[in-house]
Image: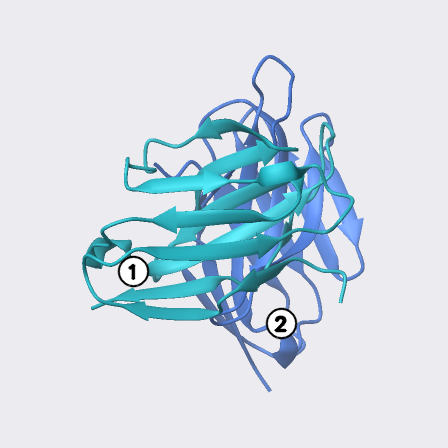
Chain colours: A blue, B cyan
Amino acid sequence: SQQGEEDPQALSIQEGENATMNCSYKTSINNLQWYRQNSGRGLVHLILIRSNEREKHSGRLRVTLDTSKKSSSLLITASRAADTASYFCATDENAGGTSYGKLTFGQGTILTVHP
Amino acid sequence: DTGVSQNPRHKITKRGQNVTFRCDPISEHNRLYWYRQTLGQGPEFLTYFQNEAQLEKSRLLSDRFSAERPKGSFSTLEIQRTEQGDSAMYLCASSPVGTAVEEYFGPGTRLTVL
């Protein structure tokens, strides 16, 4: 079963606008990760946020994590046409504090950035 | 190229045939994962190895599926007596051992069962 659920399922914006995607999950986690996937290709890791962190930045990416609400958000600022892709959140479940790296992915958000 | 590689990239087979996929992880990575992704869905965990030991298998991995990682290097995923429902993208990923590490994914093998 899918633990992470992304919202919205699809997002269409103009170049230069910001894009925000949300993810909810159900169990306690060790960390939460965001990945990007271009059509028919493998996944590329974007950012990892640990369960004891609340916010993290990487370039134009900003991720927040609210463990009390079991939710995370990914913000892409000043979007570009090259950001067009599917974005997935993935949770690494906390099994007694041990991380096995077994990721549970959501269904993803399809982002389209129009030039 | 020092990334994760997978072969073949595409495989078309007839129902009932056996297929085998190969994954070559990043050389210094101890962990290797297999995921399956169907159209419009996120990847689903199948199994993972730490070195040569297979430590967990998803219930998605029926008896027709078997994975190996001899000598803790490359891994193979075999599907016996393929069914149309096995059509999917099979993704391999690797990572070092750690408490919070990113996984590096290969390009995937797209399987089509006719």
* Residue appearing at x 38%, y 69% in the figure: B11
Q: Quadrant of residue A20?
A: bottom right
Horizontal and vertical percent for residue A107? Answer: 41, 51
Q: Which residue is mark 2?
A: A83
Q: Which mark is residue A45?
A: none
Q: Which residue is mark 1?
A: B87
* Residue appearing at x 35%, y 57% in the figure: B19
- In the depicted structure, whether residue B38 falls above or below residue A94: below
Q: Nearer the viewer, residue A110 or B38?
A: B38
The answer for how far apart the CA atoms under marks 2 and 1 are is 28 Å
Q: Nearer the viewer, residue B77 or A12?
A: B77
- Residue type at the position of mark 1: Ser
| Position of the N terminus of chain A by quadrant | top left
Q: Chain of mark 1?
A: B
Q: Chain of mark 2?
A: A
Horizontal and vertical percent for residue B40? Answer: 35, 61
Left or right, A97 with respect to B89, comes to right
- In the depicted structure, whether residue A42 falls above or below residue A25: below
Answer few, some or many: residues within 10 Å of disc 1's Cα (few below 14, many 20 plus, some between 14 and 19): many
